[in-house]
Amino acid sequence: MMQQLGLITGASSGIGRSLAHEHARRGRDLLIVARREDELNELADELRERYSVAVRVVAKDLTDPASRREIFELVEGQGLTVDYLFNNAGFGGAGQFHEQDWDMLSGMMELNMRAVAELMHLFVPGMVARGRGRVLNTSSTAGFMPGPLQAVYFATKAFVNSVSKAVASELQGTGVTVTALCPGAVKTDFADTAGLSESKLFESAATPQTTAAQGYTAMEAGRLEVITEVGLAVAIKGLMPFIPERLAMAGVKKIQS
C-alpha cells in the first residue's frame, strides 16, 4: 500500500524532478508522470535507492486529452489514494503570436491549462471526501502580466493563478488546499524549449531545487501562492499596479528579446 502518495506531472526534469525529491525525502511515496519513460525510470530508481520509498512510473503525454482520464483510471483501478497532486507539466514558446505555429500554441494551452484543471477536477473530489489533500500547481510570475513575445504562455499562467486561487477559496474548511507556485526564471530546459536561452531573463535564474523547496513548504502551509523571488514579489505586488500597462509590457518585451 502506497503511503501519502504524491502524483507529479512533468516529473522527468526541472522543477518536477526536484519536487519528487522534496516529496520522497519526507518518506512519502510517488507516482511520477512524464512523456520520457527512460528518464522517469532513472528517477524512480534514484528515489527508491536514496529514500526507500515506493515509486510508480506512468509515461503519458498530457497534451493528449485522453491521458488525464487514463491516469485517473489507473490510480482508481489499483486502489491508490492521491493525497498530493503536483500539476507541474508545462512549456512555453517565444515569438510573435501571429508567426507562431498554431499546433504548438494549441498544445501549450492543452497542457498548461486544460490538463491542470482536469487533473484537479478528477482528483480533488476524492480528497474532499477524505477530508485531506494538497494541490500544488506550478504557475509563474508570468501569470501576473501580459507577455509580449510569449503571449499565450503568459496567458496560460494567468489562468493557472486564477483557477488555483478560486478553487482554494471554494475548498476552505474541507481539509484540502490549493497553492500556486510562481517562480521567475528557473535553470531548467524550459529556456531551450521556449527559444529563450539567449534571453537576459535567464542570466540570474534560480535553481529548480530551491524553487521546488519553496513551493513544497508553501503547499504544506496551505498558502494561496508563493512568489519565489523577493524582488519579483515586491515588483509585482508593490510597483506594477502603478506602472502604465503599455510601459510594463514594453519592459517585458525588451527582457525577452
Image: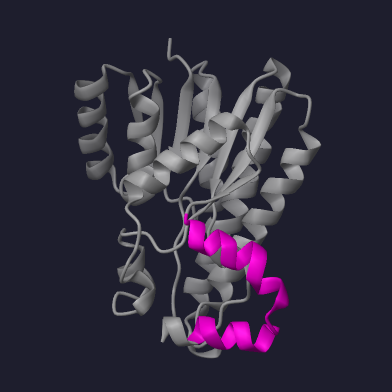
Frontmost residue, 89 versus 201: 201
Query: Which of the image's four quarters has the C terminus?
Result: bottom left
Residue at point 55%, 89% (across, down):
98
Which color scheme did the rendering employ for the protein? one colour
The answer to whether residue 100 is above or below residue 11 is below
Q: Give the answer, above or below, for where 66 lies relative to 94.
A: above
- Residue 203 image position (x, y, % from top left): 30, 71
Q: Residue 26 occupies which quadrant of the picture?
A: top left
Residue 201 located left or right of residue 158: left
Q: Is residue 236 magenta?
A: yes
Percent x, y for residue 224? 66, 43
Magenta-highlighted residues: 229-253
Residue 49 or residue 101, whichever sits in front:
49
Residue 116 falls left or right of residue 44: right
Work out whether residue 199 can be spotted: yes
Answer whether residue 72 is visible to the viewer in this image: no
